[in-house]
Image (cartoon, rainbow, N blue to C red):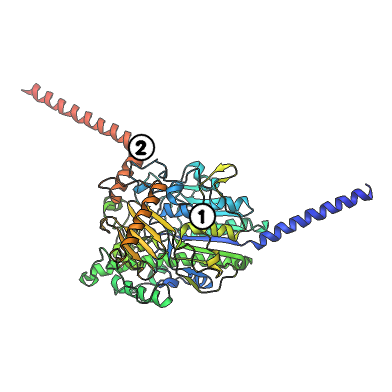
Amino acid sequence: MTSGRMKVRALACALALSTCMAVLAADRARPNIVVLVADDWGFSDVGAFGGEIATPHLDALAHQGMRFANFHVAASCAPTRSMLLTGVDNHRNGVGNLTETMPQSHLGKPGYLGSLNNRVVTVATLLKDNGYRTYIAGKWNVGTEPHNRPDQRGFERSLVQGDTGSDNWDPQQRYLPHTDRVQWFEDGKEAVMPATYYSSEFFVDKTLAYLRSGAGSNKPFFAYVGFQANHVPLQAPRAFIDKYQGRYQQGWTALRQARRDKAAELGLIPKDTPMATMYSTDNWDALSASDKQYQERRMEVYAAMAEAMDHHVGRLVAHLKQSGDFENTVFVFLSDNGPEGSDYNDAQPWLWTQYTQAIDKLGDKGAYTIMGPSWASAAAAPLNGYKFYAGEGGIRAPMFISGVPGTQPNQILRSFTHVTDIAPTLLELAQIPRPGNSYQGQPIERMSGRSLLPALTGAAQQVHPSDEAIGYELSGNLALFKGEMKLVKNMAPVGDGQWHLYNLQKDPGETLDMQGQMPDVFRAMQADYESYAQSHGVLPMPVGYSPSRQVIINSVVNYWWPVYGIPVLVGNALLALGAAYLIVRRRRRRQSTR
């Protein structure tokens, strides 16, 4: 080989090495990202947001970064998760409503597929295509079709539950008879699940295994953990439950006031924030001693379930510190919606056959409990309403981001932010351009959110311009946000079906209707909502719609009839023929003996 060729080859090798080193350096400069999604947590459940529940690991992360005091999601799980993953409004990404509560006349219409459509790209896809390792463990709930499972939506490794929820001790046990089985998928295929587990522990175990498997790649990672805590059924290890024994003897009204006062002391709400009188909050003092004891145990289990989740978050944090990844990791924590206030009375006949509800068993395997509307009202303090409704208690969730370079510790942002803002924020942190109207030659919906990075680094105190109108709809409960103002309409039984106007900066509890003092703003925001509904394909709810009734209808039409309808019909027909045969035979015998 000539010396000239050797020099050329040496130069090529040097350039290749330089390029490789530059890529590695860029990867090291880009942060790892961990997204922690809690299920059905109230605004003040986290200690750092005013709660009494022990959440030391979440609190530590929150105080290292920025808490978002005015952060909004959808009022149920699937719509929120669809927006979190895509940065696109749920009516444009295909998840205009939760499948279980969707009217049959809406199902399959544009925006009402019940799963992600083919016009959105997930943040996981964008991160993976730009050099990130991508993992997910836990609740998915944005589509179970083969093309909508995580392996086709940007995740290299995945173990997910496709449903809205399931038992936390037995992965095969349904929490309601929505479907014929719990749907679990691992890397796109049906998963083989253990006979028993505890959900929060299992999801973190999977995440840790994924992180260890790719540790030698020198590539940054994106890890999404979708917890079931605190979705019904409320369940937790006994050691956590017993820590809260006697903690809730004063009842839900006292707890709601204490949380409101603590949130004000922390600076998350104005100190003079009033609280609305909550719908369906029973008088604690009027309960019998045994009823109080039972209700206390429900809340003890709820608190224990949250602390158990925090404990396993602590295991994940400890691993990242040990591996040396913690200092270069951004954490995002949020709840997918407000606390669950349903009473589940319609499900009692089925629950009696599946679970015990005995007080001494609550929280254990084979036991079922909920928090109910009164404790949910306390968990949402100082806000109005809870899950499924458009009051702040249903759609304002605890959220914080920590680990972003340039963020001062223990900061609070009080201006309006939205779940669609998270995807653009993660892309900017990862130095990835936000796609426009197409990606890899395919048309897509443009992200509607705005990056939170200017607020995180102190460059801005407001993410959305004061004249930007941001609409919202879910199951006929409506809202529109514009600057400090919120226009809202909630359906019965929680609401009155009428529009109301509130100043969220001064009155986050939604106690003082401003439509009389601000008639022009009231009318203008109604017009803004109509524009939003028309441009996003929002469909009106059928007359007489009830979400609880619709769950029963959909369970029969979508699941029970296709699975069991023909066998039941044939069985009933055979029984009828058998009965007719016996009647005819008996009559003939009587006639022959005469």
SS state under label 1: strand
Which three-letter amino acid code belongs to the residue tagged 1?
Ala
| Residue at horizontal 68 percent and vertical 60 percent from the top | 26
Of residue 511 and residue 212, the one placed in the foreground of this image is 511
SS state under label 2: helix
- Residue 271, image x, y percentages: 37, 77
**Location of mark 1 (residue):** 137
**Location of mark 2 (residue):** 562
**Extreme residue in the top direction:** 592
In the image, residue 441 above or below residue 69: above
Of residue 167 and residue 17, the one placed in the foreground of this image is 17
In the image, residue 586 above or below residue 384: above
Of residue 120 and residue 177, the one placed in the foreground of this image is 120
Count residues near mark 2 (Cα–Cα under 10 Å), then give few for <14, some for 14-19, many for 20+. Answer: few
Of residue 58 and residue 517, the one placed in the foreground of this image is 517
- Residue 16, image x, y percentages: 78, 53
Res. 489 in view: yes
- Residue 529, image x, y percentages: 37, 54
Dot placed on the residue nearer the N-terminal end, 1 or 2: 1
Left or right position of 224 against 507: right
Query: Mark 1 to mark 2: distance in Å?
Result: 30 Å
Numbered circle sitting on residue 399: none
Res. 155 in view: no
| Residue at horizontal 54 percent and vertical 67 percent from the top | 456
Left or right position of 349 against 338: left
